[in-house]
Amino acid sequence: MPTYKVIYKEFHQLTISNIQSFDTDDQDAWENFRDDAINNYGVDPSDYPEEAPSDPQVWFDLIAQLSTDDYEDREEDCWTMNKGGFDTIYELEDEDGNTIDSRV
């Protein structure tokens, strides 16, 4: 005897924010970011000074070239819940996973 499934789906939008803070006076942090960029991401060493720059735009340019997986913090915001709702659908599937019917 065939089996069927009724599936209720919710569609949410998720905003993921990877965050890396920095202090333009932190020479050690600058060296770590710069070394990582040079050694792992092919950044030309002559593009960035050895001394930590006071211009946050230079830091921004360098850090933006690094993997966001290595950033120090991560926040996830399922903002559709914050806006008061999300799209839903009911689906009827057969035993092979084929959708037979759907209703919003």
Image (cartoon, rainbow, N blue to C red):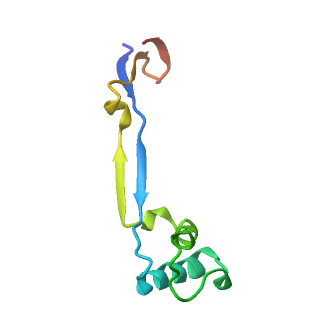
Residue ranking furthest to the bottom: 50
Q: In which quarter of the image is residue 84?
A: top left
Where residue 72 sits in the image (x, y, percent)? 37, 67
Point 36% across, 13% down: residue: 1
Above or below, comparing residue 88 to residue 21 in the picture? above
Which quadrant holds the C terminus?
Answer: top left
Residue nearest the observer in this picture, 31 or 102? 31
Residue 44, percent from left and from top: 67, 81
- Indicate whether 54 appears above or below 79: below
User: Residue 74, percent across and down?
Assistant: 36, 57
| Residue 51 x %, y % | 53, 88
Residue found 43% across the figure and 35% down from its top = 13
On screen, residue 70 above or below 83: below
* Point 42% across, 58% down: residue: 18
Vertical relation: 74 (above or below) 4: below
Tag count: 0
Q: Is residue 84 left or right of residue 55?
A: left
Residue, far front: 54
Q: Give the residue drawn at x 39%, y 14%.
A: 2
Nearer the observer, 39 or 49:
49
Location of residue 4 by image quarter? top left
